[in-house]
Amino acid sequence: MRYLDEFNDPALARRLLDDVHRATTRPWAIMEVCGGQTHSIVRHGIDQLLPEAIELIHGPGCPVCVTPLEVIDRALAIASRPEVVFCSFGDMLRVPGSEHDLLTVKSRGGDVRVVYSPLDALALAEAEPDRQVVLFAIGFETTAPANALAVLQAHQRGVTNFSVLVSHVLVPPAVTAILASPSCRVQAFLLAGHVCSVMGTGQYAPLVRQHRVPMVVTGFEPLDVLEGIRRAVLQLESGRAELENAYPRAVRDEGNEAARRVLADVFEVCDRTWRGIGTIPASGLRLAEPYRRLDAEARFDVGAIRTGESPLCRSGEVLQGLITPHECEAFGTRCTPRAPLGATMVSGEGACAAYYRYRRLDQPVAAPGRGG
Amino acid sequence: MADVAGPAADPATWSCPLPLRDHDTVVLGHGGGGRLSAELVEHLFLPAFGGADPAGLHDAAVVEAGGARLAFSTDSYVVRPLFFPGGNIGHLAVHGTINDVAMAGATPLFLSTAFIVEEGLPLEVLGRVAEAMGEAARLAGVRLVTGDTKVVDQGHGDGLFVTTAGVGLVPPGVHIGPDRARPGDAVIVSGSIGRHGIAVLSVREGLEFGTVVESDTAPLHGLVAAMLAAAPGVHVLRDPTRGGLAATLNEIAASSAVGVEIAERAVPVPPEVRAACGFLGLDPYAVANEGVLVAFVDPASVDAVVGAMQDHPQGRGAAVIGRVTDAHPGVVAAVTAIGGTRIVDLPLGEQLPRIC
Amino acid sequence: MCLGVPGRVVEIHGEDLGRTARVDFGGVEQVVSLAYVPEVQVGDYTIVHVGFAITRLDEAAALETLDLFAELGAGDEPGTTEPSP
């Protein structure tokens, strides 16, 4: 068992697809919450293999896309300071702020570095005590424990030149906000498998009961995504609304207790603004009191941040599943991965970028190219 | 392309195919071999230099002189670190330019080289690079005939940059170019992809990971000669270096105004490359190669060409991965393993490891 | 969100929150933190995200899932939908 090829098997994918086709008798709208699943769906062409009656709505589960503009602009300002080494996951480097992105900061002399693990940033701080190392701590519940451990260890070891710019977000409040929206069309949810690996599944049971909506914990390989869709369809067709785990090899009901313990120690829940969506109560994490001295926002005074979002960008509606990317007039013309207007076009997980990269063949958008 | 003929240096006038307004300075992606690189050539260099037709652009130019057809190419090599599993910057500098000349169907003959050395580089390092270049040239049967050395202040270089230029002779009757793909052509790769890029990444500072993957750096002119001798129907040759297979297929699709359709199951991606791309979040189709070529071949010649490739040391893993279609000109599509389809886009610039 | 890749634990060092492992992702090895998976032992598979093992993969559960897929539509004519190319 290698846990990869087995879950990419074309013959089994065919069986799952056949079963979905057999089961589907009516139109259904299913949201995959997680950007990783959006990526998998378009990367493998899964949406085109489903019955036409099934509509997949791409949810707000891309941390790059929902990081608020104000935080991006603050990151750009901090990264531009001469004493700072700004460490970020590669995903964030092309996300547009009001005026430019981290790659532009780097090209103008800012010391911006891509890290693979948050602990690499801490190691860098310890190796270069004369520099101020700032970690851009973004992500959902899966990434937050990793950033939390970097904070905890910096605190314990008394590292004074390390700080974090925190913009963590939480999935359940976002799902709640989507369900509470009067324009909500979502009839079932595929829940983010790796978030559930950390947090468990308990937070979703009340939502299933209260809103009578099926939720299926779903993995990321093609067979996992198909199984999540299949189970959602079976529930919808039979009028059930239950919480199911279609990713049991990686998700236990109770989640990861060790990770949750450190999370609860280092961070506390706060309100957060989601780019393109707005403020969602209790939907984010910030440093808890004992760790505030590691807060980059407090450490670096970058003055008032004034943001300016493109008026053309409809990423908020895309993130809420109200429109698909190609329904936006700027899609593929004024807004491309090369010159993105909003973060959904930047991140590999962003619905717009995923559509642009993988779906143009059947979209009425001219393919740009030399000599074309 | 008429609308780009104006004063080229002003980004505000860059209007085709897409407005380039997000960078007013050069960013790393401009050298990444993807869309940003292509736009720089198309909108800044070509209008300034005058003349060349972007659709005919090739890694080597074919020019006539004294009754002979010469393939002429130049390339600069910047790689960090200078030494990586399977080779060093010297091997790349010799093999890369040989390959660029060979992709015009030419027999490479002479190379020039220029070094930009950062003050403080150990002479021993420069010596090892020079020896690697000499050995690579000897083994390839190509002569290094002239060169130049410049030294820059410490902090103004990255240890060592190497530039090589090369000339070769195009045999009579050989006409190969990126604009010559035709519907029906088979798309062939000479071997497994992604090894060079992953080998270099595995020793990149801050990203080190353990792997048995070595760079595939190798001269390909012998393989090209064997292919041309086997059958007449070789239309396009290209070595998918920066930007990888994805960039190469997109460039050819655009230059020839044809569609390309590949079957993902047929593309040889070594398991180690797939694994490294998996945990770094990279697309193996966009990872650089230094010893692989892509060929577009007339259907009548496919069997003979593939056979000749598989008989050659550099082409043992040759495989047909797709075909040219007259549907969706300029677009590369892939049939995925589970039977869906997707677009293989021109990579934007440098690939960045991602977490999500 | 959250690119997570399965890998096999080859070698373990340290303890508690400082516990790390060499993890094999199929011919590629990387050192990852085992801070959050104290139960993981050499030979186990784990999902790795940003250099952290976040969960131990359960082989029995994986096999059960695959068996379920294999049984789907057993006895039916295969290929009732669009054939795969």
Image (cartoon, coloured by chain):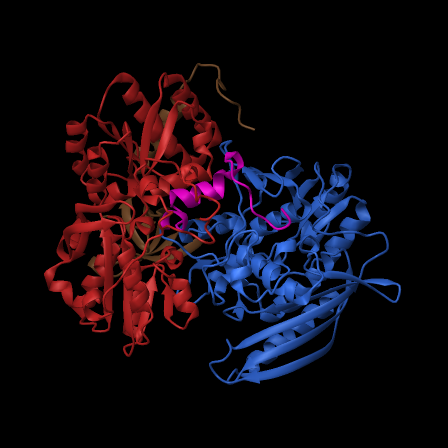
The quadrant in which residue A13 appears is top left
The percent position of residue C53, horizontal first and vertical second, equals 29, 51
The percent position of residue B183, horizontal first and vertical second, equals 70, 37
Q: Colour of chain A?
A: red
Q: Nearer the viewer, residue B76 or A11?
A: B76
Residue A152 lies, with reference to residue C5, above or below; the image says: below
In the rendered image, is residue A104 in sight?
Answer: yes
The percent position of residue B87, horizontal first and vertical second, equals 58, 66
Residue at position x 72%, y 41% from top? B182
Q: Nearer the viewer, residue C32 or B243?
A: B243
Please indicate whether residue A229 sits to the left or right of residue B321 in the image. left
Residue that protrudes farthest toward the right in the picture? B67
Q: Nearer the viewer, residue C37 or A166?
A: A166
Chain given the colour brown: C
Residue A368, magenta (yes or no): yes
Q: Colour of chain B?
A: blue
The percent position of residue A368, horizontal first and vertical second, equals 56, 47
In the rendered image, is residue C64 in sight?
Answer: no
Q: Which residues are magenta?
A: A343-372
Residue C77, magenta (yes or no): no
Q: How many marks?
A: 0
Residue at position x 67%, y 75% from top? B113
